[in-house]
Amino acid sequence: MQSFHPPRRLLLGPGPSDVPRRILDALARPTIGHLDPAYVGMMEELKTLLRYAFKTANPLTIPVSAPGSAGMEACFVNLVEPGDTVIVCRNGVFGGRMRENVVRAGASAVMVDDEFGRPVDPEKVEAALRANPGAKALAFVHAETSTGARSDAATLCRLAREHGALSIVDTVTSLGGCEVDVDGWGADAVYSGSQKCLSAPPGLSPVTFSPRATETVKARKVPVQSWFLDMSLVMAYWDGTGGRSYHHTAPINMTYALHESLLILHEEGLEAAWARHQANHERLRAGLQTMGLALLGDDDGARLPQLNPVVVPEGVDEAGVRRALLDDHGIEIGAGLGPLAGKIWRIGLMGASSRPEAVDRLLGALAQALGRSR
Ligand SMILES: *Cc1c(COP(=O)(O)O)cnc(C)c1O
């Protein structure tokens, strides 16, 4: 055996996205102790950069030391107690995972279902909130990576608040790629991931809790069933105002990488990053149209720029095309999930992968794999 050298790829799937050299360089810097004052200073900067990315002033804004699924779990296990009712919106695969989290926390999940590919319907959500007074939380996915649908987070968070429920919002695919406005939305518990539009490697999950969510954690009747994800313990580890206490060892070099990726986002500016994602999405959509390929869903503002679900034409070998892109062109795209398996390809234009050259390379390769002209 010898050292592992991965092949060169262009990552245009549902995540991870291409990691820029600058972030890989940050990852390769010397590991220092996680209680070293120099590291502690970096942790404080990292929290400030995360607040910028999320558009929030929430003091409790940290990266959970594990991928996006752990951020999801952290939100549910901290806010939901046995016997609670949580309204869960399901318009794709990740809404189904939210339900799993609610049920495993000993609570009951009231499902609001929408067709895969459609955004969450606020009218159905309002009806569910009316029918379930006292519901602890409303949970939904802002950017459904399984379908490319964007839901109206501002409206959904407002409905939750009006009915006295907390809002739990998945922004794993949206953060850095399209507007996320935690304080503007009035969202309570929001989580994301490092490997989608932030273009760091996978392994960290930024989360932010509103003061209302933080109070809810402090007022729990039973301890959080997960010791590792218990925010009342984790927040003391990330608290730079004094007495930082050992909880676990943060993945030190990964936090360097996330810090660098957020610095890149800050340098570009949030609005500029969102506009870049939109422009490259439009470039892709136009190119696909020329080839006679269509995106799933309608052009009604509910389509994500960073995740493009392409309808597989009749008679085309879905998996064969993905394989040809990978083998002949070094390009990774994603397959459909759940009911959309075999029916769509998922083309991610996330973070550093959202650039015109990447779009053009993919269009050329796809035309070749399909034997179509552009
Ligand atoms: C990728 C993703 C997750 C899970 O993140 P992991 O880092 O794979 O654990 C959760 N929600 C959405 C919407 C995602 O796209």
Image: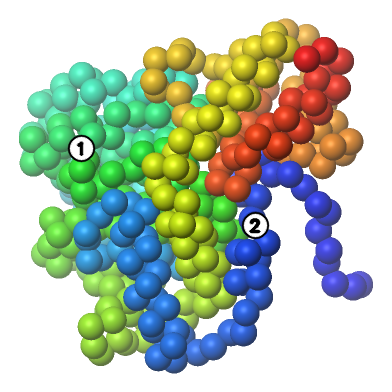
**What label does residue 20 carry, if any?**
2
**Mark 2 lies within 8 Å of ligand 1 (Cβ measured):** no
Asked if one can make out residue 272 in the rendered structure from this viewpoint, the answer is yes
- The image quadrant of residue 358 is top right
- Dot 1 crowding, Cα within 10 Å, few <14, some 14–19, many 20+: many
Residue 73 visible in image: no
Does residue 136 appear to the left or right of 88 in the view shown?
Answer: left
Q: Amino acid at mark 1?
A: Cys
Q: Secondary structure at mark 2?
A: loop
> Residue 251, image x and y in percent?
52, 74
Residue underneath mark 1: 157
> In the rendered picture of this protein, how many numbered marks are placed on residues?
2
Question: Left or right of 52: which side holds 155?
Answer: left
Q: Which mark is residue 5?
A: none
In the rendered view, would you say 61 is above or below 295?
A: below
Identify the residue at horizontal 51%, vertical 36% (top origin): 277
Figure quadrant of the N terminus:
bottom right
Reply above or below: 340 against 12: above
The quadrant where residue 329 appears = top right
- Give the x, y percent position of residue 161: 12, 39
Query: Residue 337 at x, y = what percent?
Result: 58, 31
CA distance separating discs 1 and 2? 34 Å
